[in-house]
Structures are given as structure tokens and as C-alpha cells.
Image: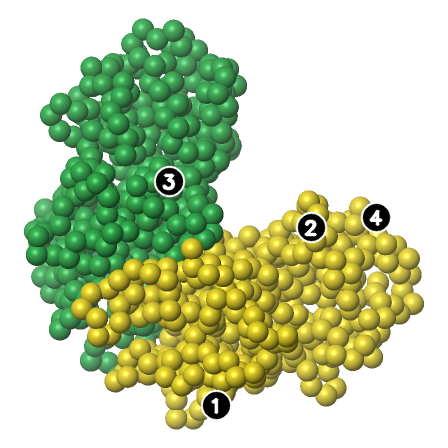
Chain colours: A green, B yellow
Amino acid sequence: MYALNETHDLTLTSWVDSANQPGCDFPIQNLPFASVRRAGSDEIFRGAVAIGDQAIDLAAVRDAQVFGGDVALLVALAAEPKLNDFMAEGPEAWSELRLALSRALRTGAAEQGALAQCLIPLAELEYDLAMTIGDYTDFYTSIHHATAVGSLFRPDNPLLPNYKWVPIGYHGRASSIGVSGQAFHRPSGQLKAPDAAEPSFGPCKRLDYELEVGIVIGRGNALGEPIGIEAAEQHVFGLCLLNDWSARDIQAWEYQPLGPFLSKSFASTLSPWIVTLEALAPYRAAFTRPAEDPQPLPYLSAPGNSEAGAVDMQLECLIQTPAMAEPVRLSQSNFSDSYWTIAQMVTHHTVNGCNLQAGDLFGSGTQSGPEHEQAGSMLELSRGGKSPITLPGGEQRTFLEDGDTIIMRAVCDKPGAPRIGFGEVRSTVLPAR
Amino acid sequence: MYALNETHDLTLTSWVDSANQPGCDFPIQNLPFASVRRAGSDEIFRGAVAIGDQAIDLAAVRDAQVFGGDVALLVALAAEPKLNDFMAEGPEAWSELRLALSRALRTGAAEQGALAQCLIPLAELEYDLAMTIGDYTDFYTSIHHATAVGSLFRPDNPLLPNYKWVPIGYHGRASSIGVSGQAFHRPSGQLKAPDAAEPSFGPCKRLDYELEVGIVIGRGNALGEPIGIEAAEQHVFGLCLLNDWSARDIQAWEYQPLGPFLSKSFASTLSPWIVTLEALAPYRAAFTRPAEDPQPLPYLSAPGNSEAGAVDMQLECLIQTPAMAEPVRLSQSNFSDSYWTIAQMVTHHTVNGCNLQAGDLFGSGTQSGPEHEQAGSMLELSRGGKSPITLPGGEQRTFLEDGDTIIMRAVCDKPGAPRIGFGEVRSTVLPAR
């Protein structure tokens, strides 16, 4: 767990004026990472850090030799097209670069002149995935989602007996993960209506989104060497937003007995900016279980995890149909309602000796809150397609239609702490081919 | 599908005498690929092709400029530490290099002098994975395995209704895949005996192997562009052997509703030599379904797939316990008993637009034959642990014990065609940590 330090100081201001504005996602206390280039150019992508409405081009910082010593070496790693090598350096390195950037961006910093030459407006950027994702694991940490979806797929048996003991997860497809802006064709596949004698082939009719938190692994572990829960967060670089697109009709027919496959592998979309776990230190919250529930097994328990294992991260999902001038909100939820913590996911994943690698991605699973209107998927909001949602303007949706855009946003915000925003992940459904 | 050509000619002999011996896995008609270096050295791994009891070091072939023109470029790609770029070149390129090597290795070839300088005895080699595996997908193509395992996990409902329609598969863990010689610690995890009120944590007690064929993807496809069944095999570089280690007790507790996870992610082991699909052309066999079964949907059907979609590949699994001087056979089966073909796996995997990438790995799923003694896992052989297997010397096994080594071999062999061997995959269970 990260301690609060001078980089979290609420009174810090930056010489980048836009970073000091109320409601800014990227104040000087945030400093998230992405891989960027100027939109429409054929420049090489390189690492960058957001500040206000600008990005610090780390390749330019490297070339201008703004920093010396160890920090210069870290800048060079983080300036690569993919940040895997920087992520692999571990928390001391991440903290060292964060502190150096924080000091250099403060009002009155001596580095202002050199660093100002390295800024590019966010409005001029396009993004790549910040890391090469070797393996992608999707968890299932919202008990509210698991119960709601379980009741649709298995009315007699919604929450399976293992749910309160095992941080349930499955391996997902890494190749089809894209960055915000991804547009994808509606998938086709095998579908079988409950009353049909045989399956048929055709475009998915029950296309859905899933509102998830993406967890980016930094330092990995060797095969055969589990990560204990007290060290688990030292292996996590940061968090972002993940839309884990799902074809519900394909899923219902294919998923037994080996789990989701083609219903999830046609696209998944990440937000470009990875917020470090250190930036989120002011928003750590207690992790508790209802007294009547089983408490986690010892290997998933630690004082730090109980005291501050959760993250108070407000999540929001919006839709913009082709008929809408502006997106409208579909739901809101909070990552702190998760039934399992980030540390528990890391420890459980490696308890069998499985090796994580820098740049691996975990999905938190759909983050639905305890109330129906906090559902993180259309499947839940429309009660399995039985209760259409009426949008402003009178349009209705049970599942997504071609041309629909889904936008997800997140923010950590509370009195007495700096606002830490995540930007957004936005992606659009194209017609089936 | 590959046509027979001069490289398959049964009468070809090589100036590498060992390649002409009866029972040789690697005659001149085979020419499989691996990534090798001298055992115990710190040399850089590089691509190699097996011939008899020797490997052609492709980096040495490149440096000696044995070939010119396009072939020299292909040698350079295949000489890299990982063969992904060569695999991505596609079937015309793979055939071109195969033909050039076949001609240069024939008795009396002008290249003998130069190429002989590039040989290293197989006995002096160690191996790396031949490719970086971006994504690993494990299928479930043996209906005999699915029925037998289903009856153990779900006695009332062994073969689910989708099995005869959908080539069932799930995403596996790529990071923990190793090459023959891999030794791994017995995994620990959550276990729950059927009669226990709560799960406990500890070492797996029901450790098992799975006898599988590994399918290596060569040329990939773009996201959103499915691969039709008639073109599917053009995307497959070759086949190898895969031991998909499984912790059956972890699996039974964790697998619902999202499928296998930690029960499979602690280790999977590949044979080092990848046999190209072209080398297997003499062993292609008709793909048929029992008349009473549903026939594959149109997107999974094509004349070529019916005529020659199967591969007549004999599979064998052996065990060597610490008490044994020599391994003994546990079972034999044949890949041609698979319920789905390679082409059907490729097409189904991409029908939703999922993108495959060069070096991706498919597992065939455990290849159990129709008879009980043809079972490809200990779970099946011991009938869920209820019928111990007695080994020569009197030892018994229901599942694997520490120190046990599992060896898998495969060969294509029939009168009138060259013997095409796969070498072996060998791996050992170490005690839990």
C-alpha cells in the first residue's frame, strides 16, 4: 500500500494552468501514463504523462535531457512505444519518476522552461495501448453483477457456491484488446434461441457492454513463485477503464462447460491513460465483508488489505446513439463495492505458481452496484432484454444497436483530496459484415 | 490443403545417413522447426530444422550464405530466436524454404559441403519455445474425453447440448507454457471435497496430464475479418505435442461458471519441434460424422474439410516414476478421432472477427479415443480416482505423484508414406513449495 507523500499534497499547483482548474481529470497529483503520437501523423508512439489539457512527451523529455541520473534512465524507459519495461521496474522506480515530474511541474519549478517545450495538447493526440498485453484475465468481482447475471443464465442457481470463496476469473483474449476509439463490427456466431431445436448462424442480437476497471500488472513474478497478499500491490502499476464487450446470445450457447470464448473475443476497449496506484493513495478504503458471509481464507487476508484494500473510484457509463447530440448516462457505480480487492486478485492468480508479466491486464469484472440502476451492463439494466430502457428522445434499447457509442468515465473525488480522473474509454458498434 | 509434391517422395534419401534409418522421426520428408542452442551454453537461441539425429543451425546457414535470393531471406527470418516472423510469411514461403532444404539435403546435393558445416547433433541441443505465444486457446475436440470427463464432473449431464454444434474452446494462459524439459512445482490452491462444508487451501491432490496436439498459427488475420473454412489451413504453420497439465481438484471447485483458470495456468508443456502441415500431407484423412449426429453448420463445412480434414497422427503417453528405469506406456490414441478438424477450429475461432496472430497456439483438447484404454488423461484412466492404475513393479497411481515424469510422443506412419515423427514432450512434477 502506498503512503501519502508530497506528491499527493492538495495545495500543489502546476505552471501548466489548465491542471489547476476545478474538475480537471489530470491535476499535478495524478500524472497518469499513456502511449501517444500526434493524431494523423506517422510518428512513432512514445510514452507520455498527462498534466491538465497537455501531455508531456517523454521522448522529447529524454532528448532534451531535462533530467539527469536515475530519473533520466527511467524517462528513457517510459519513453518507449510500449511501457512494459518501465512497468517491470517496480514501485520504487515508478515513485521516483512520479516525484521528479511532480517537482518539475510545480509552480515556479526550474524545469519549466525545458519541460514546456515537451508539451503536446491532448486535443492533438492519438493513442496506442500503453503496453503489450501478454495475458488478459477477466475477474468477476461484483457480487451484484454475478447474482443478477446468474439469475438470468441460471434462474434456479444464480450465485454458485464457490463465489464467496474464490475470486472467480478466466483467461480472456489479449489480441482483440484495443484502445479508446476502437470501432468494431458486430460479431456473428452461433446462436440458439431457448425454444429453437437447433442453433443457427448469424449476427449477434444481444450485444452488450461491461463497465470494468482495468488493472495493469507492473513487476511480474517467476513461474512457481506465488505473490503473497502483503506484497501483491507492489506488482500493480495502475488502473484504467475497460469496456469488455459481450455478445450475450453467443455467450449463452457457448459458455458451458468451459466459459466465455467468442462472446468476448471480438473486441475489448481500454482507456488510454493508466493512473498509477500511488496516485490513488488518498482514495483507498476499508475492505469489509458482511458478517454473515464467509471471511476470506488466510492466504487472501492481511491487515493492509482489510484497512485499505478497496478503491473509492466512481464509475460511470454513457451511451450516444446516432440520433443523440450528446451522450446520456446509463448508470453509475463504485469500485469499492467489489467483493474482492486488487491484492486478492493478484495473490489468488499466482497462488498456483502462475507467472504474471509486466503489462498483463486484469479486468475487474463488470462493476455493478447493489441497486438495479447501478448495473454495469445492458443485460442487467434491461433485465435480460425484457424491460427496454427508454432514452431521452424516446429511443428504446434492450441491447446495443449499430452506430451506438458507449463511453465510460471514472473519477476519484472527495473533499480534502485532489480529484483524480481517468479520462474516458469510447467505442462504437459497426454493422455486422 | 497441401498437395503431395517432390518433398514427400518416399524414395528420397539424405546425405545425413541417420535420416535414412528405419524408425527415424526426422527423415528428409519431415523437416520440422525448433528454436535451439548448444545445451549449457549462453548462445543466442536460433531457428533450426531437424534431419536425422542432427539439427541444421539456420543462423549458421544464414552466415555461410548457403542459399541465395528469396530463400536466403527466408533462412534469415527462420534463424531468429523466435520464428514468429517466419511463421507470419505464409504457406508459399514455408513451402519455398522446405523445398530448398529438401533439395540441399538429398543424397548427392551440391550444398552438402556447405550445409554439413551447419549441423549440430540433437544430443547436444537445448530448446526454447519456437515462437512467442501471444494467445493460447484450448479446444475440447475429443467427444470421448468430453463425455468421460463430463460424466465425472456432471454425472446427470455429461455431454452438454452444444457439444455437437460448437467447437468448444476457452482462452488459456500463455505465460506459463514451457518447452519439453519443463519441471514445475505441484500447484497449491483452493480445494473442496464434495462432503466438506468449506474449502481449504493446500497442494493439489489430483494432479493430471492431458495428451493434446498443439496447433501453431502462422499467418494471422485482421480484427474483424473472419477466416473462411476453405482458407483456414493456410493460416496454420504446423503441429506439435502439448501436455496441458491439470489440477483436477482445483478445477472442480473453481470452474463454474467461467471455466478453467488456476487449474490449468501453473504449467503447460510443448514439444520443441513443430512439424509443418505440408509435411503431414500424406497423412490427411477423411472427416466424417456419425449419420445420427448433426452435421456441421455451413460455415464449418467444405469439401476439402470432408475429404481430408483429419490427420492420421498416432499419439502416445508414457509415465516414468522415480522407481522406474524406463518409461511405460499409459495409453495410445489417434488425432483422427477428433470430433472437429483443425480448419473448423480456425474458422470458428475467427467467425466473430477475433484476430489470430503468428505464433498463437491452439490446443486440440485431450485426445482420448473411443476405448477406455485410449484415454488421454489420468482422470479418465483411473475413472475419477476410483480405479487405481497398477504400473509394472507394482506401483499404483490414481493421479500423479511428486517426481513422476510424463512423456508424450507422436508419429505418422503407414505403408507407402514416409514416417513423420514429432519427437517428444517430457516434463516432471516437483513437490509443492
Mark 2 crowdedness (10 Å alpha carbons): few <14, some 14-19, many ≥20: few
Chain that bears disc 2: B
Q: Nearer the viewer, residue B227 or B39?
A: B39
Which mark, residue B287? none
Going by the numbered disc 2, the residue's amino acid type is: Gly
Q: Are marks 2 and 4 on the same chain?
A: yes
Measuring 75% from the left and 53% from the top, which residue is drawn there? B58
> How would you rate the neighbour count of disc 1 (Cα within 10 Å): few for under 14, some for 14-19, many for 20 or more?
few
Q: Comparing marks 1 and 2, which lies closer to the viewer?
A: 2
- Quickly name the residue at label 2: B40
Q: Of the residues shown, which amino acid type is indicated by label 3?
A: His
Circles 1 and 2 on the same subunit: yes
Q: Nearer the viewer, mark 1 or mark 4?
A: 1
Quadrant showing the C terminus of chain A? bottom left
Q: Are marks 3 and 4 on the same chain?
A: no
Q: Position of residue A279 (x, y in %)?
A: 28, 29
To the question of a shared chain for discs 1 and 4, the answer is yes
User: Residue sitting at 15 percent across and 61 percent down?
Assistant: A147
Q: Nearer the viewer, mark 3 or mark 4?
A: 3
Q: CA distance from mark 1 to mark 4?
A: 52 Å
Q: How many marks?
A: 4
| Quarter of the figure with residue B96 | bottom right
Which numbered disc covers residue A235? 3
Pointer 4 indicates a residue of which chain?
A: B
The disc at residue B64 is: 4
Residues B193 and B152: in front is B193
